[in-house]
């Protein structure tokens, strides 16, 4: 229904503005506590500042006790192992430690931790607490830090945690034999120098990536090794500042810069109607009505004849039929009209083909620019000073100095602050937001930002989340990050025929899995990766390419019965819907309507959606984009059906 979509958009936009930090960006509300961060923090503070931090340590231990599950553990084996080690190290909670050990053994022990590096950290913590199962951690090859190129390839983003753990082994393991003693001595000095350089590059805040868990590892390793006391003091200060009022620590701190960029791009292109005074209906009742409508017999055939542009059933045998027979391909549009080049055909593409048309992409998706309403009271041309402030905050948050750990020059953006660790994904989202702003053609920041992003490609032409050419599992070339970089460069005006984009698109076309999906670094599901790549291919004019068609069909096939995607999460659902809409799947098709219906029912009274894998701000921003495109494309009667 028209009013429900308008109300959902207004509520989502309102939730963003309510959680804006004093510094300028969106925060997504109070971050939830993290077992790993809390356990690491109390162990580090107990080791580095046992007297001054005693109250913090006690509060953190109490938080861990409160968040223990009924089975005696803390969720997965890794969190359980670190939590019981923390409680044992701080000298409290013997009953909880015993129960946690029983639960850890029932889950298979540390051997059940799939990630090798995480398993090593678990063993290190258990060994530190005197709870080793007899399988002691091996000595880490700290000598890797002596060669920068090798270090980046072999350690990647995890280098700081690796170095901190290796320094901790100075006091938890016996000294090595004579052949290695000399090389380890040099490596330890180089490791401390590396942490010193990261500390300097961050402005000496002690944050180490704005992650309490990682800062705690640095604090613990240096404190136990008796090195760099000034860094230890800085990390202690950061851990005190990062503590939550309830005694726990969040996984990350600071404003969500990457999420703010996503949300700002959505706000710049979304018209928000004035708030509807009618109270919102009960989401549970909405969901039940939605499911009832889906299971009603002949729900589609009982409707009146469709108007122009309305969805029709796919022909039998077309291969696009889904739960109710409506699985249509892309509608006529830039993606559908484009040539269907394969990997070798980019040279035949006319100059500028597939390039984002700024005059089209930046106008109102649901009406002419300057239309009524917007962002609670005004649209992108309404003169809302908050938008200009956010844009300026993003520009100010750009890194002004190189970041040596990643061999990254100045000019990129991090996920949190202007002195954080630069990320290709965060930089791509900022570029999209800046390109969506009025007057972006004259923005002096955009060209340099695009050059920085192009310079972060690896030798294969793709992008990794953090470090170029790394071989670390889960940190190498990523289809999702590469896809976001492609969208960003197109938004910045880079022609699709330019070599960086041609090479990236070639890589994406070759990265598809046999089932039509794409991976996403750090995420076990493939909905997000597949959706990101499908959107990028569509924006690049390759929506009709067989790879894009397979990705689109796969997303349509795996939609859940309730209309959501993946594990039934908001983040996976909004990304899938956004990709399908960008790929030309009609907004009034069953798949999109069911997805929008689920999204409306899942929205919480405060305007947000429950999230699992991605931050609240980015999910809300992408939901705004989906609902705005849906509202612009679907006649009011069809929207009534989605909200029924």
Image (spheres, rainbow, N blue to C red):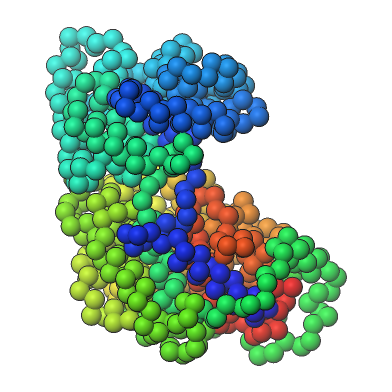
Indicate left or right for 642 with 87 as reference: right
Q: Is residue 440 visible?
A: yes
484 shown above or below 639: above
Q: Image height check: is 447 above or below 463?
A: below
Q: Can residue 259 be seen in the rendering of this structure? A: no
State the quadrant of the N terminus: bottom right
Number of marks drawn: 0
Task: Residue at 64%, 67% (x, y): give it.
Answer: 600
* Left or right of 294 in this view: 8: left
Residue 300 sits in quarter: bottom right
Closer to the camera in the image, 458 or 401? 401
**Residue drawn at point x = 21 percent, y = 51 percent:** 408
Residue 79 location (% of width, % of height): 50, 31
Q: Residue furthest right?
A: 297
Residue nearer the viewer, 562 or 282: 282
Compared with 634, 28 (above or below) is above
**Residue 575 image offset from top left, x and y in percent:** 52, 63
Front position in the image: 17 or 641: 17
| Residue at the spot 36% in from the left edge and 83% down from the top edge | 383
Q: Position of residue 631 (x, y in %)?
A: 58, 79
Q: Who is closer to the viewer here, 274 or 575?
A: 274
Classify the position of the C terminus by image quarter.
bottom right
Left or right side of 392 for 117: right
Residue at 46% over, 37% down: 248
Residue 115 appears in which quarter of the rendering? top left
- Residue 552 lies left or right of residue 37; in this view the side is right
């Amino acid at each position: 229904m028209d009013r429900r979509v308008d109300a959902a958009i207004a509520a989502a936009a309102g939730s963003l503005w309510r959680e804006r930090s004093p510094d300028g960006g969106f925060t997504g509300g109070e971050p939830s506590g993290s077992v790993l961060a809390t356990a690491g923090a109390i162990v580090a503070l107990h080791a580095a500042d046992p007297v001054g931090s005693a109250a913090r340590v006690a509060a953190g231990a109490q938080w861990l006790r409160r968040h223990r599950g009924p089975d005696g553990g803390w969720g997965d084996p890794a969190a359980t192992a670190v939590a019981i080690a923390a409680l044992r190290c701080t000298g409290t909670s013997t009953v909880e430690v015993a129960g946690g050990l029983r639960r850890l053994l029932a889950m298979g022990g540390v051997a059940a931790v799939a990630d090798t590096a995480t398993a090593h950290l678990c063993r290190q913590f258990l060994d530190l607490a005197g709870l080793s199962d007899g399988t002691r951690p091996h000595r880490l090859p700290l000598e890797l830090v002596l060669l920068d190129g090798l270090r980046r390839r072999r350690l990647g983003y995890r280098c700081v945690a690796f170095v901190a753990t290796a320094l901790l082994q100075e006091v938890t393991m016996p000294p090595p034999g004579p052949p290695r003693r000399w090389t380890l001595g040099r490596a330890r000095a180089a490791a401390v120098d590396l942490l010193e350089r990261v500390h300097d590059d961050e402005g000496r805040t002690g944050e180490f990536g704005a992650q309490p868990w990682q800062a705690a590892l640095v604090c613990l390793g240096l404190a136990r090794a008796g090195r760099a006391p000034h860094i230890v003091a800085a990390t202690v200060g950061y851990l005190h500042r990062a503590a939550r009022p309830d005694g726990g620590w969040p996984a990350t701190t600071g404003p969500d810069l990457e999420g703010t960029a996503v949300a700002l791009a959505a706000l710049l292109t979304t018209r928000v109607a004035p708030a509807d005074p009618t109270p919102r209906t009960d989401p549970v009742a909405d969901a039940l009505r939605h499911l009832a409508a889906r299971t009603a017999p002949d729900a589609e055939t009982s409707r009146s004849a469709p108007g122009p542009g309305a969805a029709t059933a796919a022909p039998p045998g077309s291969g696009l039929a889904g739960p109710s027979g409506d699985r249509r391909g892309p509608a006529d549009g830039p993606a559908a009209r484009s040539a269907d080049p394969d990997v070798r055909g980019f040279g035949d593409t006319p100059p500028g083909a597939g390039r984002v048309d700024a005059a089209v992409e930046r106008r109102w998706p649901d009406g002419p620019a300057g239309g009524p309403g917007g962002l609670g009271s005004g649209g992108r041309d309404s003169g809302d000073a908050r938008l200009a402030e956010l844009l300026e905050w993003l520009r100010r948050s750009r890194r002004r100095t190189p970041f040596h750990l990643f061999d990254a020059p100045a000019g990129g953006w991090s996920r949190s602050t202007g002195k954080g660790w630069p990320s290709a994904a965060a930089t791509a989202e900022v570029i999209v937001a800046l390109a969506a702003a009025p007057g972006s053609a004259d923005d002096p920041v955009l060209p340099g930002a695009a050059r920085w992003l192009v310079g972060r490609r690896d030798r294969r032409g793709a992008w990794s989340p953090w470090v170029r050419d790394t071989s670390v599992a889960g940190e190498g070339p990523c289809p999702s990050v590469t896809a976001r970089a492609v969208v960003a460069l197109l938004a910045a005006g880079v022609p699709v025929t330019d070599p960086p984009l041609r090479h990236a698109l070639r890589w994406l076309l070759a990265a598809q899995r046999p089932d039509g999906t794409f991976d996403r670094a750090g995420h076990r599901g493939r909905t997000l990766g597949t959706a990101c790549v499908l959107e990028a291919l569509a924006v690049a004019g390759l929506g009709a390419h067989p790879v894009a068609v397979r990705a689109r069909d796969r997303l349509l096939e795996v939609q859940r019965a309730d209309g959501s995607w993946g594990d039934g999460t908001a983040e996976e659902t909004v990304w899938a819907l956004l990709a399908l809409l960008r790929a030309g799947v009609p907004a009034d098709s069953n798949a999109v309507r069911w997805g929008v219906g689920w999204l409306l029912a899942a929205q919480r009274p405060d305007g947000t959606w429950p999230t699992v894998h991605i931050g609240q701000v980015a999910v809300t921003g992408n939901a705004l984009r989906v609902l705005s495109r849906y509202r612009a494309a679907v006649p009011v009667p069809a929207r009534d059906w989605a909200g029924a």
